[in-house]
Image (spheres, helix red, strand yellow):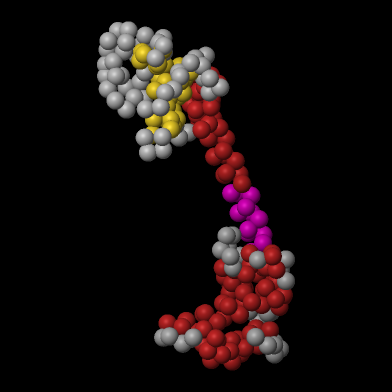
Amino acid sequence: MARLATHPSDTGLLVIQPLRRKQCAACRRGPLPLLVVEDGAPRCLDCADLGHLVFLPRGDTALTRRSREESGLSAVVLRFNRRRSRYERQGVLVEETALARAEERCLADAEARRRRRARDARRRAVQDARFTEAFAAEIRRLFPGCPAERAEAIATHASVRGSGRVGRSAAGRALSEGAVVSAVVAAVRHLDTPYDRLLMSGVPRHEARRRIAVAVEAVLRGWRGASADVG
């Protein structure tokens, strides 16, 4: 195993998780789950005056940082990785009261984050509802013959946050006519024509669209009151 000094360093005191069975050179107790090397000899934590500390495994960066901030005495626990030929951090030893205070701080932060997420979710929900309403209003403006409930359904589907649908594109958020028409055409294509059945039967997408273009155009003409190219 590579030699490692366990005197204070930039990271604090160092404690080792030994790979082999070790006994304390002072009190002869063993095998030791953790040890400190002093003058080249292993010492148990009690003999090294670290026995009152508790082990906090790695994994929670905030809790580790705060535990060390709260603890008057702490140590970094290392274990040698034979495959990588290096010591790797396993956690820290801190005072039990310091760990409790750190846990309280983290819980307070977690509650604050939960409340912030809830506020953000409510704000996004309000924004989404307003946007969906505006999208539906634009559908009704462009297609006055479209039933109100259908316009709302199209707008809701097209504007789902994170969906990648046309309503969430830059053009969709700007309520551009092209984006709104695209959302309406897509809805008509899937709900008012045999387009989905054609796809399921193996008809290529472009051919399926060609076959149902007249039907889509008929619905749009009825909703708009004037002819228009579907594309």
Residue at 57% x, 44% y: name it.
118
- Residue 79 visible to an observer of this rendering: no
Provide the major secondary structure of the magenta segment: helix
Q: Nearer the viewer, residue 81 or 152?
A: 81
Which residue occupies 63% across, 58% down?
Answer: 128
Residue 198 x %, y %: 46, 86
**Magenta-drawn stretch contains 69:** no
Residue 9 visible in the snapshot: yes
Left or right of 140, for residue 111: left
**Residue 143, position as x, y percentages in the image:** 68, 79
Compare residues 164 and 197 and report the one nearer the observer: 164
Q: Quadrant of residue 20?
A: top left
What is the span of residues highlighted in magenta in the rendered image?
A: 121-134
178 relative position to 147: left or right: right
Q: In the rendered image, which quarter contains the N terminus? A: top left
User: How many numbered discs sit on the rendered protein?
Assistant: 0
Image-quadrant location for residue 231:
bottom right
The residue depicted at 61 percent of the width and 90 percent of the height is 218
Say left or right for 60 vs 167: left
Determine the image quadrant of residue 23: top left
Report the residue at 56% width, 63% height from top: 163
Q: Position of residue 14 (x, y in %)?
A: 46, 20
Q: Is residue 219 above or below residue 132?
A: below
Q: Is residue 122 magenta?
A: yes
Residue 192 or residue 172, whichever sits in front: 172
